[in-house]
Image (cartoon, rainbow, N blue to C red):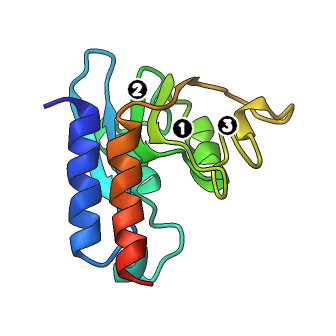
Amino acid sequence: MTPMEMALEEARAAASRGEVPIGAVVTDAHGAVLSRAGNRVEERRDPSAHAEMLALREAAVLRGAKHLTDATLWVTLEPCAMCAQGASLFRVARVVFAAYDPKGGGVEHGARVFAHSQCNHAPEVVGGVRESEAAELLRAFFAARR
């Protein structure tokens, strides 16, 4: 299973818990999975419990280091400004995301955190990987709530 497939699996699990279906996986330079998580904002009553932040925190604990300089963050939706800044602070090498987020994204849209002059570390970014599948998960989730 690829890291993005694992992230999509985490997103589906998040949806089954009533969370916005976003999943994230952190891999090392060799592609080994360090951590994986889905959103837990509602469960924890914590607006910072985004999949990306949970996965990054867990990977850092596993590594025993605050920086993940050889790591790739795989996520099903373009990271928001908070999660993009988190990826920068953890100093990940690469961010790969599925669906673009014109409304709340912080990488290609909105704050464009990595392009900001005050950004300390800008990882390589790849967007649109399994985009339609991730976007459909989100569409179905929100359609069911309207």
**Amino acid under label 1?**
Phe
Mark 3 or mark 1, which has the lower sequence index?
1
Residue at figure coordinates x 74%, y 40% from the top left = 112
Going by the picture, which residue comes out furthest to the left? 1
67 lies above or below 132: above
> Circle 2: is it few (<14), some (14-19), or many (20+) Cα within 10 Å?
many
Instruction: Tell me whether the residue at label 1 lies in contact with that at label 2, contact meaning CB atoms closer than 8 angstroms.
Output: yes
Q: Amino acid at mark 3?
A: Glu
Q: Which residue is mark 2?
A: 71
Where on the picture, by quarter, is residue 88?
A: top right
**Is residue 42 depicted above or below 20 in this figure?**
below
Q: State the residue position of label 1.
A: 90
Per the image, label 1 sits on a secondary structure element best described as loop
**Residue 40 in view, yes or no:** no
Residue type at mark 2 is: Ala
The earlier-in-sequence mark between 1 and 2 is 2
Q: Residues within 10 Å of mark 1 (few under 14, many from 20)?
A: many
Please, which residue is most extreme toward the top here? 30
Q: Quadrant of residue 114?
A: top right
Residue placed at 40% from the left, 56% from the top? 51
Image quarter (top left, top right, bottom left or bottom right) of the C terminus: bottom left
Looking at the image, residue 109 sits to the left or right of residue 1; the answer is right
Residue at image location 22% in from the left, 38% down from the top: 5
For the residues labelled 1 and 2, the Cα–Cα distance comes to: 9 Å
Give the alpha-carbon distance from disc 3 to disc 2, as whole Å.
Answer: 20 Å
Q: Which tag, 3 or 2, sits closer to the chain's start?
A: 2
Considering depth in this image, is 94 or 21 the residue closer to the camera?
Answer: 21
Note whether residue 121 is visible: yes
**Where's residue 80, x and y in %?**
61, 53
Q: Which residue is mark 3?
A: 108
